[in-house]
Amino acid sequence: MKITPLASALLAAGFALAADPAFADVAPPQDVPFNGTLQIKVDATDLAHRIFRVHETIPAQAGPLTLLYPQWLPGNHSPTGPIDKLAGLVITANGKTLPWTRDPLNVYAFHVDVPAGASSVEATFQYLTPQDTKQGRVVMTPEMLNLQWNAVTLYPAGYYASRIKAQASVTYPAGWQAGTALEVASTSGDTVSYKPIDYDDLVDSPVYAGKYFKRLDLDPGAKAPVHMDLVADEAKYLEVKPEQLQYFRNLVQQMYKMYGAHHYDHYDFLVSLSDKMSGNGLEHHRSSEDGTSADFFTEWKKNALARDLFSHEFNHSWDGKYRRGADLATPSFNVPMSDTLLWVYEGQTQFWGQVMAARSGLWDADQAHDMWAYTAATYDKGRPGLASWRNVQDTTNDPIIAQRRPLPYRNYQASEDYYSAGQMIWLDVDGKLRELSGNKKNIDNFGKAFFGMDNGEWNVNPYTFEDVVKTLNDIQPYDWKSYLRTRLDGHGSLIGGVASHGWKLVYTDKPSDAVKAVEARRHFTDLTYSVGVSIGKDGNIGDVLWDGPAFKAGLSPGMQIVAVNGKEYSSDAIKDAVTAAAKDKSAPIELLVKNFDEYQTLHVAYHDGLKYPHLERDKGKPDHLAELLKAR
Ligand SMILES: [Zn+2]
């Protein structure tokens, strides 16, 4: 791993901090080789208790030793290592138990004294996986498991994670099969030993294993194979139709056509088809964790909206894993990350995820248009917080601020908007490139130039904001710095890309298929752009648009709507009331709401009818969106 100026500065600070007794007594990572290899043995057979049991041998010498549990997790971009679930830690050397102490100022660091004559320590502990989703992501079921190495390993402080070798083995439940980017060294019964690998790459190479398993070849005959490894709740969910397989094969080829290079020697989509194990979407260099519903393939139409999960996570192998914001490319998992460039990492990946879903055929043109309309509306009227007090750049802090906890007023607080606002900014950039170059240059040129170098190379290649600007300028000279900073730091429109691609964002009283699907999937009624509220099951209010009609009427996210105009609440009842109030301006929208144990009637002053976003063609302009979404 290359090291960046900012990480060096952090290290320098680390040296200074370590010398000060007011701060944690943990040696900062250094770019020196670690002598020996971590031996990690994981017993993954206790499905009933949902426990991973770990035995780890760590080469060591006499004297003080600090063992770290990974805290700052790549892909999460936040200090969310699940240390609350590490239990039963016992450390021994030469058969004798060593007392350990946890650093009082860094709860992820364990200190021991290694006795004279010992050349290693043994650490045993359990990782107690969540028993239900309130405790975190469920990763073990009777049929499958998701093993992430950061959760089941300790590593010595004082080294870059890339300078520590690790050799892992896992004992799986009898008869299970496993998918992972790790390469198998040997198999004995149900125990699989993997080839030694750098510790940072081990953490980047999780395992999905299961009772029901299938492996699909997404690029037959390729020198760098791409596979999809499926685990499922039941064997019947593993049925993949030839046309479905073809879309994923198209995806691989469409990515290669655009980028012209890839950054792995092999790649595995690790896919769980489950209603028991929690969903997931986590990128890695040579694999991705793609957790989706059990019926993803068997109810293909119903799950259309989930399909860009795969194009999104695959894109991260280029954008995020190979090329990474310099301040995010940290030398170990216990050095703080800085997330300032996530609008490239996640924003452009959100962009390509949706474009490639269309180019590969995973989405048809109508599905793609609906989803772009849905996103454009969010940044037209759905984020009053971005129009007033926050900007897109500031939302790159949200993985650290909110850590994906539910928020009281998401639309006003804004959260992780660098994803979808970033997507709109990159659409805007594509439009500007086309405009300035007479449609000779576009975002594909940027993709290839910025992410498509050094085929096969997969050491991290970090970049800065200036590098982004320079690449854009090399393609098409312009004041790209101001262009980007205005959108990232300001409060103006982010959806100029819709018009520059020959379309208009309009609102009608009919929901698009995408809105209907989102409503069905999340069990809510989306009235964001009319009365300014989204309502969950049984009338429980979700988000209330800041200063919108519902907000002004006194509604808040903690309330439950019990009745609409004197009738029991239903999704249809409130939609009918909104429609009636538009036809007859004296018709009320009267809501009986429950707030704790109190009931009250609130009157919503709104007479403009139901409103749902759509894209409508602007016939006066060329259709650049069609060009963007067309297969190469
Ligand atoms: Zn992502």
Image (tube, rainbow, N blue to C red):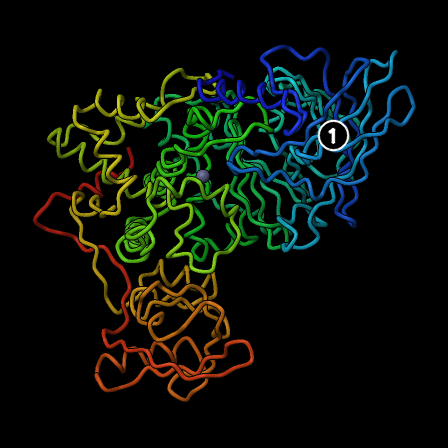
Q: Quadrant of ligand 1?
A: top left
In this orientation, which residue lies closer to the viewer: 165 or 205? 165
Horizontal side of residue 514 vs 158, given as left or right: left
Judge whether 107 appears above or below 608 on screen.
Answer: above
Residue 424, by quadrant, is top left
Judge whether 249 appears above or below 608 on screen.
Answer: above
The local secondary structure at tag 1 comes to: strand
> Disc 1 marks which amino acid?
Phe
Q: Judge whether residue 246 can be spotted in this image.
A: no
Disc 1 target residue: 110
Q: Residue at x 33, y 67 (%)?
A: 532
Q: Residue furthest bottom?
A: 566
Horizontal side of residue 246 vs 433, given as left or right: right
Horizontal side of residue 236 vs 35, given as left or right: left
Mark 1 neighbour density, 10 Å: few (under 14) some (14–19) many (20 or more):
many
Judge whether 245 appears above or below 382 on screen.
Answer: above
Residue 516, by quadrant, is bottom left
Q: Percent from the top left, x then y, of residue 344?
A: 36, 33
Q: Residue at x 40, y 54 (%)?
A: 413
In this orientation, which residue lies closer to the viewer: 302 or 22? 22
Q: Percent from the top left, x then y, of residue 630?
A: 26, 39
Q: Residue furthest right?
A: 95
Q: Percent from the top left, x then y, of residue 625?
A: 22, 43
In this orientation, which residue lies closer to the viewer: 532 or 258? 532
